[in-house]
Image (spheres, rainbow, N blue to C red):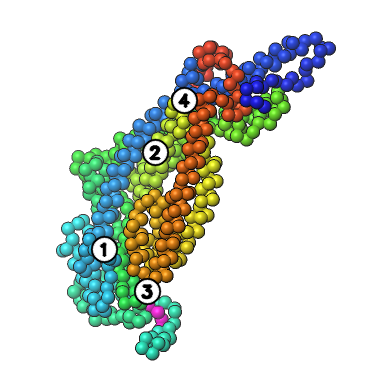
Amino acid sequence: MEESEPLAPRRPGFGRAQYGWSGHIQSLESHIVEDFRRKLKYFFMNPCEKYKARGRKPWKLMIQILKIAIITAQLVSFGLSNEMMVTFKDESLLTFKHLFLKDFKDYQMEPYAIYIKADLYNHIYFVIDRFLHLQNLTMGNLAHTMVDGRTAPLSLCKVFYRNSSIDPSNETFNIDPHIEQECIYVYPMGSVDKCLDTRTNFSLDFRRLISVNIYLSLKSINLQTVRNHELPDCYDFKIQIIFDNSAHSGRVNVVVENNVSIYECKDWRVEGTSGKNNYGLLVFDSVVILSCFASLILCGRSIINGIQLQFEFNIFFHAYFNKIVSWSDRMEFINGWYILIIISDILTITGSVMKIGIQTKFLTNYDVCSILLGTATMLVWVGVIRYFGFFKKYNILILTLRAAFPNVIRFCCCAAMIYFGYCFCGWIVLGPHHNKFRTLDKVTECLFSLINGDDMYATFLNLKDRSYIVWLFSRLYLYSFISLFIYMVLSLFIALITDTYETIKHHQQDKVPVSELQAFMAECRDQPESGRYQTNNKSSISCCCSG
């Protein structure tokens, strides 16, 4: 079918001259086709045009504008609370390093490590001594954990091979690879005696030693939330100090890990506060949930109406024009923006429920809640682009993204094969010689940074002092990757999008329908103000959402 040729209806079962009323039938069929064109055109109108056509208020549009304001405000409120929690956790971990690691410096570039046997013993005894005298040393709200009315002890565990006989001078060894662990416990009560007992009874066989692990538990209260009218949380820190000798290279790396549990304090009192929770925030979160629930229902209803109209259009087109509707035309009825809004509403409702649980201290998973609310807010703001798309001068971005998306995905799949090939090659060859290629995830991050022109010189420089064969391979590897992806792959990627942009711009300037569906609707010349779109169902005007 030529784009300029109007679609002529085929009269199923009619048109025989002997009936004498073919003209009436043809007029009736033309009226049915025009009504259906008008119905389709109304479905694809923007909220302003629908209001002019039938006076139906754009409730979805108004709800989306409301959601932008309240969801953003909710995110800012939660973000401030989450920031205080993360800051307290990070500063507490830094405090533990200064308290329990001997001669720890914030600015040291190299990992904290020990190289002499005596230093390892001194560091272990230093940790024990600091644990025993914690209350007299720390400036924070730290205390030992109580378990069944008794102070939780410090656990000192050594992990080692079951048996081994190693003689490097004769290049001989005999080792049992099974791993064993022995632990001793140090209680704060009677601290001096316990520390002396540990120094006397604790010994290490460095040839069998894999690691020394120290476990201790501390409690604290985050009081800074009081300034923001929030109830302070109680924190339970499970601290693990690992002296890692697994490489047996003479270097013992020291790592401090901190596992945090957040919960409601048992007995609390804040002067000037009569209630346990900030009811204003709870009411606000409830409003957010209700608005998202209303948006979810209205957008879901619009998607269902679109699916129903799609089937109706498919049957109509086949009956009157004996044509099969293409898949792309059928997908026009499924509004992807509504799906995006529904996903955003689901994430917001889930995140708001979790936020209420955090405020009432039934839940403490800040990370999951922040991911849900952050993603939902991003999708809400992105969803507003849909309404800019109703204006011809602003919808070029949306049309370009939608038209270029299939080709971009196919192009990225092909480029990904080359990219991952370089990733695996760099990981296995350059990983032992360069920190940025040490693990597979670091390789992917490093190569992606190189594509964007970041840190190129430092990547070349760190491989300068390696063996000649490694140096030569690294140059060939890096030069070929940068040349291929920056000068070819990235340029083709940009050209692909640019070409789509030019095509869309050409269609907009010439006003050429790009599909049979659009060509069919273009034959309807009725304007929204013509009154031809009015229905007899007046009661639906105030309750139907068509935004």
Task: Report the residue marked by disc 3.
Answer: 246
Vertical order, 252 against 503 (above or below):
below
What's the residue at 44%, 61% (across, down)?
477
Q: Residue furthest right?
A: 18
Asked whether residue 327 is in view, the answer is yes
Vertical order, 232 against 389 (above or below):
below
Q: Work out whether mark 2 precedes mark 4 in sequence or the reverse, and give the earlier one.
A: 2
Image-based side of 21 in relation to 286, left or right? right
Nearer the observer: mark 3 or 4; the answer is: 4
Residue 74's mark?
none
Q: Are marks 3 and 4 in contact (CB under 8 Å)?
A: no
Q: Work out whether mark 3 precedes mark 1 in sequence or the reverse, and give the earlier one.
A: 1
Task: Report the residue marked by disc 1.
Answer: 109
Say which element carries label 3. Answer: loop
Residue 388 on image: x %, y %: 43, 28
Between residues 197 and 380, which one lies in front from this camera angle? Answer: 380
Q: Work out whether mark 1 precedes mark 2 in sequence or the reverse, and give the earlier one.
A: 1
Q: Are marks 1 and 2 in contact (CB under 8 Å)?
A: no
Residue 499 on image: x %, y %: 50, 37
Image-based side of 213 in relation to 321, left or right? left
Q: Tell me which segment is drawn in magenta.
A: 159-163
Between residues 124 and 271, which one lies in front from this camera angle? Answer: 124
Amino acid at dot 4: Lys
Say which element carries label 2. Answer: helix
Binning the other alpha carbons within 10 Å of mark 4 as few (below 14), some (14 to 19) or many (20 upward) gives few
What's the residue at 30%, 35% (across, down)?
280
Amino acid at dot 1: Met
Task: Report the residue marked by disc 4.
Answer: 392
Q: CA distance from mark 3 to mark 4?
A: 65 Å
Q: Quadrant of residue 37?
A: top right
Task: Report the residue marked by disc 2.
Answer: 377
Vertical order, 207 against 266 (above or below):
below
